[in-house]
Image (cartoon, grey):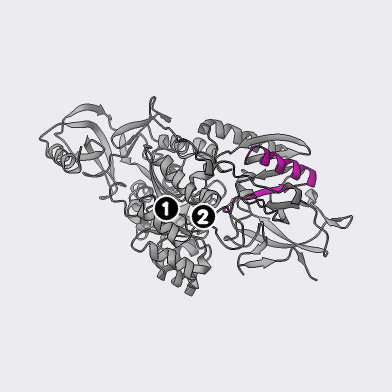
Amino acid sequence: MSMPDHLTDLLAVARGDTEADLLLRGGRLVNVFSGTIEEADIAIHGDRIAGIGPGYRAGQTVDLKGAFVAPGLIDAHVHIESSLCVPSQFAAAVLPWGVTSAIIDPHEIANVAGLAGVRFMADSSRDLPLRVVVMASSAVPATTMETSGATLDAADLAALLAEGTVYGLAELMNFPGVVHGDPGVLAKIAAFAGRPIDGHAPALHGHNLNAYAAAGVQTEHECTTVEEAAEKLSRGFYVLIREATNAHNLHTLLPLITPANHRRICFCTDDRQAGDLLGQGSVDYMLREAIAYGIDPVIAFRLASLNTAECYGLHDRGALAPGRLADMMVFDDLAAPQARQVYAGGRLVAEKGRIVPGLSLASPPMPAAIGATMQIDWDAVSLSIPAQGDKIRVIGSLENQLVTEERILPASIVDGLAVADPTRDLLKMAVIERHTASGGQSLGFIQGIGLRRGALAGTVAHDHHNLVVIGADDGSMLAAARAVGAMGGGIVIADGDQILAHLPLPVAGLMSDQPVAAVAAGYDELLAAAAELGSPLHDPFMAMSFMALEVIPKLKLTDKGLVDVESFGFVDLFVDE
C-alpha cells in the first residue's frame, strides 16, 4: 500500500468512519505528553495508532481489563555487540521487557571489519520487530594509540549516510580531537550537520566542555557524578544515564533528576551482557529502579521513551498518540512496571516474558569479511617482562566503573623478570594485536580482577578488540590466549594448561551465532569458573574488556603500550625513583 493510501485509510479509522485492525479496550494509558494516566481505548491501523478514546470498532478487540499501557521503551545508546549476540538474538532478549527501539553504535564490529561490519549490523537489524537506529561509528580507530582492523574517515561515514545505512554520528570518543579542532574529527562532524551527534567525554568540564558543545555534540553518557551531569545539562547536552553490566551509574545519578530538568535526561545501557539482559532487563530495569527511588512514574516513562525520541528526532515513536507507531507495553503495576504484553507496530511480539511463537527473528548469512578475523603471529608472542626498576605503574580496576586508577607499586621480581603476584592481587596483563599478524603486543600489570590463579583471555576488548589476557602466571595466560585463537575468537578461562570454560564468538570475534539463552548459559560457565579461581567481581570478563580502552581515564593498556589517558600519551611501565 502506498503512503497516500495508507494515510487515507488511517484518517478514516481515526474519524471513526471505518473499523480499525486492532482495538485495545479498557486500558489505562500512560500519557507522557500530559503527564496523566488516562482511561482510554486505543485504535490501531496497520503499524500506527489511529485514535484514542471511546467509540472505535475493530476487526480484533483485546480487553485490557484496566491494565496500564505505555509507549515502547527506547534504549538511547547501546552496543549490541556487547551482548555477545547478533541483532536478532539481542532483540529476542529485550523485546519481552518492553524495549521496542534501540539507538546503536556498531563501533565494536566496525573496529574489526570496517564498513562491512557496520553494514552487517544494519542488514541484520532491518527486518526485526525491534526498531534499530544505526549511528555511524566515529571512533574507528578510537585513537592512534591502538591497532584496529579498520579505519573509517569522514568520507566513509558520509557514504554510509548517503546510502541510508546510518542515521547520525555515534559517540565522539576522541574528545581532545573535538576540543582542539582536529581536522579529521571536524570533517566527521561536518558530514553529519543537522543530524544527531553523540558525545563521549568523561570528566570534561569548564572551557573544554564549552568547546565540545560548540562543536555540535548533543548527548553525553559518561557522567559518573551528579555534579558532572548537572554541568553538562546546563551546557545543553542531553544526559544519557547509563546502567551497563560493568558501569553502574544509575543509582548515583538518580538524585540529578528533577521536575525542572528531567526532559533532557534519557536512559541507556551502553554495554550489557546476555545474562543481565535476560535476568535483569534493559532500560526497563532502570525505569523500575527510578520509580522505586521516588521518581514520578510518568516522568520515569518519559526518560525511557519520549525524551529519547525527541533527543534523536524520532517523532514517530516515544508516546501513545494518533499517527505514532503502535509500539506499546502492557503491564499491571505502575509502581514496578514489567511488561505483560509487548506490541511492535501494532503486532503482538512478546507475552509473559517470551517472544510469541512464530515470530521471525532470522539473521542473514555472515559475510566472509566478518569471520576469520584472528590473525596472530604466535612466534612473536612473549609474556616475559625484564625488570627495569623496582616500581611499576599498575592499572587499578574499580568495581562497577570504567574509569581506572594509576597505582605506583613495588614490582615483584623473580630471576630478573617482573611477574604477577596474586597475593597482592597484582596480575599480569597482555594485549596482543590480532588484526594484521604484525606481532605487536604490550605487557603490563593490573589490580582489581582478583584471580588467585589461572587466566582470562578474550577478543572483546573495547574498542580495537585485540586479544587481551589477564592472569596469575604466564603458562595459564598463554594457554588461554592460544585457545581463543584456535576457536576463531571468543572468551576463555584457563588454569595452567586446562581450559575451564570457553565461549566461541565466530562473528568478528565479538558475537555468537547461537540463541541468546545459549550465549547466557555459556557466559555463566565462564563466570562460575572465574569465581572458582578467586575473582570476586560480578563480571571480570566485562571488566577486562575495558582495560584496553584508552579514551576513559586514567591508565589503560593497548597493543602499542601503556596509556595515560589524561595526558593522552604513552608512559613507561617502570617508574624512575
Q: Position of residue 546 (x, y in %)?
A: 60, 52
Numbered badge on residue 574: none
Q: Position of residue 39 (x, y in %)?
A: 23, 38
Q: Is residue 541 above or below residue 234?
A: above
Q: In the rendered structure, which amino acid carries the disc numbered 2? A: Thr
Along the horizontal axis of the image, is 418 left or right of 438?
right
Q: Which residue is mark 1?
A: 135
Q: Is residue 483 shown to the viewer in this render?
A: yes
Q: How many marks?
A: 2
Mark 1 vs mark 2: in front: 1
Q: Position of residue 509 (x, y in %)?
A: 59, 43
Question: Spatial distance from mark 1 to mark 2, Cα to Cα?
Answer: 28 Å
Q: In front: 377, or 395?
A: 377
Judge from the rendering whether residue 17 lies leftward or rightward of residue 84; answer left or right: left
* Residue 252's disc number: 2
Q: Give 89 or 44, whichever is nearer the viewer.
A: 89
Does residue 473 show up magenta in the picture?
A: yes
Where is the C terminus found, in terms of image quarters?
bottom right
The residue positioned farthest toward the front in the image shown: 368
What range is drawn magenta here? 463-488
